[in-house]
Image (cartoon, helix red, strand yellow):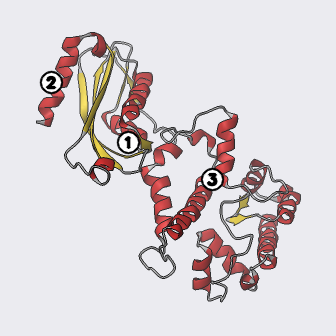
Amino acid sequence: MSQSDDITRKFSSQVVDGMERAPGGDGAAGKGDGVRRELRHGLSWHQYCRKSGTKQEGKSPPLAWGRSHAPAWNGFTLRSPLLKKKALMMNANLPDFAAQALERESIDDSMGVPISESIRRRVKQAGARFHANDNIAEFIEPGELDLLLGEVQAQMEKVLKSLVIDTESDHNTQETGRRVAKMFLQEVFRGRYQPMPALTEFPNVSNLNELMIIGPITVRSACSHHLCPIMGHVWVGVMPNEHSNLIGLSKYARMADWIMSRPQIQEEAVVQLADVLQEKMSPDGLAIVMEADHFCMHWRGVKDVDSRMINSVMRGSFLKDANLRREFLSLIQSKKA
């Protein structure tokens, strides 16, 4: 057995011992390997009890149980100050990723800090904004999205419980907390947590200076107010110059998806998209039109299923030249007809 494997075994057993000694944790005794395995797989306490056959399902979970409320290593959460100190003492012998995780969380003797709070602290220390439609990827370190998913899952399970939904007996909702957490972090809101997609840029060697229109690009988002779906299309007009960078056609769609995969307000979304394209391409003119259905109106409230929102951003020559603006709008209108 290698030194790192031995450290892993010793450290893991200490974590499990801490769980066994914690109040309400006697049901985990004798199931150390199972606890480690289930923690790594991200099961909730009652799911672990049901799967492992322990009779502790109706009792409170051990204090050490959890995936995202404290510095974590190898799938464990260290909620005991004693375990944290032991982890620090062993830090010199831990694998690099484990040592970095422990150092990153600035372990102290207080109760564990949710991973969301650790990320939030970094954002605030940098003086950055973290509104619903802001990207915070630069403040998330490797491995933390998995921890954040566990935290969001736990909070979603609390929401379902507050809605008086029996997630333990209802087979339809037993995994809903995790499904929703994965949907938010990995799909519909991934534009907050993933860095900007790479853009292939080409020099304008042919000195193109004629109007280019890309669209309709299908976009999906959710309104920041009610988290109801927004579904629609975007058209992009570009007037390049000899110094402009040109990007591949698919990159317009990728960039629009990255911007829209966040809780959004349509008026702000088109401005964000325009800002990114302007920075990357430096064209003489840039125009963006978005038309979308908002289910916060269709599904709730006034329940008006026919209303849509259309807005635009015009910059450079599109703003100054009425004929160019008219040409762009007439061309996209003909494609919608």
Q: Position of residue 194 (x, y in %)?
A: 51, 44
Name the quarter where the N terminus is drawn.
Answer: bottom right
- Residue at numbered disc 2: 330
Density class for disc 2 (Cα within 10 Å; few <14, some 14-19, many ≥20) is few
Is residue 45 positioned above or below 226 on the image? below
Residue beneath the point at 46% across and 68% down? 176
Alpha carbon of mark 3 to alpha carbon of mark 1: how far? Answer: 23 Å
Residue in the foreground of this view, choosing between 165 and 191: 165
Q: Position of residue 69 (x, y in %)?
A: 69, 60
- Residue at numbered disc 1: 257
Q: How many numbered discs, if any?
A: 3
Q: Position of residue 227 (x, y in %)?
A: 41, 50
Q: Give the amino acid type for the residue marked by disc 1 in the picture.
A: Asp
Q: Point out the tag, 3 or 1, that comes first from the N-terminus.
A: 3
Q: What element carries label 3?
A: helix
Q: Is mark 2 on a helix, strand or loop?
A: helix
Q: In which quarter of the image is residue 33?
A: bottom right
- Residue at numbered disc 3: 144
